[in-house]
Amino acid sequence: DVKVTQSSRYLVKRTGEKVFLECVQDMDHENMFWYRQDPGLGLRLIYFSYDVKMKEKGDIPEGYSVSREKKERFSLILESASTNQTSMYLCASTSPGQGGYEQYFGPGTRLTVT
Amino acid sequence: EDKVVQSPLSLVVHEGDTVTLNCSYEVTNFRSLLWYKQEKKAPTFLFMLTSSGIEKKSGRLSSILDKKELFSILNITATQTGDSAVYLCAVEDNYGQNFVFGPGTRLSVLP
């Protein structure tokens, strides 16, 4: 089975702190994604990466950066956390299926910025 | 702009009922449509439908894809309280590099 893990399930940080969210997948997937999910807004793409050291901005990259130094690991960085970044953060990776790509999600990190 | 629309946004039924969830889409380069179930945690994968597989079934859940009319439905028969969740529809349109999600349908199954 595909396994996508995230470093923390719950995280509480103060405004202005630098925050690192880590995601690891164990299936040698090339594509990895970071989303945030908020009530009423659904899943929104922050960044995705299609290879080591490669990244593309998603719909809402402002206030975030990412790092992919190894294929299995994709990190999301909040340079200076703000209260409007309180959200559920979901990491995902994709594998080719029959005729398309299946996307698998990690358990999520619920981040609260106070 | 790529778009995925789901309806209804919210649905309340009783155990044993059959429900139909709808997903319509407009994307530039459709490759596959995916259904997910999300309880109080991350979404879990249910089905993927493509041109080569436009109907899928797993137990009480089934799904069809109409590529001509650009929509999909997810059917759940004999619903159970454990089916209560948000059901997400997503469309993949760029070789696994772009997934567009709908807002989800919140299903509540009452005993």
Image: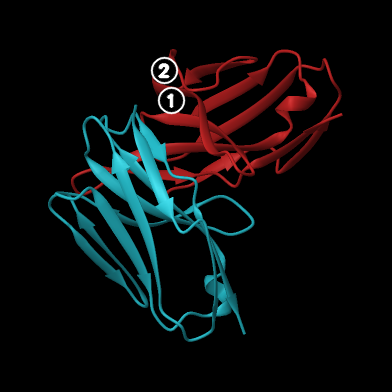
Chain colours: A red, B cyan
Q: Quadrant of the N terminus of chain B?
A: top left
Q: Residue at x 29, y 48 (%)?
A: B33
Give the left or right position of residue B108, taking residue B59 as reference. Answer: right
Q: Kindly identify the amino acid type of the residue bearing the numbered disc 2.
A: Val
Please name whichever residue, A57 or A3, is drawn nearer the observer in this view of the structure. Answer: A57
Image location of residue A74, percent across then percent down: 52, 26
Q: Which residue is mark 2?
A: A52
- Give the residue displayed 22% in from the left and 56% down from the top: B65
> Do we see residue A1 in this rendering?
no
Helix, strand or loop for disc 2: loop
Circle 1 chain: A
Q: Which residue is found at the position 26% from the left and 52% from the top?
A: B71
User: Decide: marks 1, 2 in contact (CB < 8 A)?
Assistant: yes
Chain containing the residue with disc 2 = A
Residue B95 on image: x %, y %: 25, 31
- Residue on which the image places disc 1: A71
Q: CA distance from mark 1 to mark 2?
A: 5 Å
Q: Residues within 10 Å of mark 2 (few under 14, many from 20)?
A: some
Q: Quadrant of residue A20?
A: top right
Q: Is residue A104 toward the left or the right of residue B50 in the image? A: right
The quarter of the picture where residue B98 lies is: top left
Count every numbered label the image shows and give the total: 2
Q: Which image quarter holds the C terminus of chain B?
A: bottom right
Instruction: Respond whether the residues carrying marks 1 and 2 are from the same subunit.
Output: yes
Q: In the rendered structure, which amino acid carries the disc numbered 1?
A: Lys
- A5 shown above or below A15: below
State the residue in front, A24 or B102. Answer: B102
Q: Position of residue B49 (x, y in %)?
A: 24, 53
* Mark 1: few/some/many CA within 10 Å (<14, 14-19, 20+): many
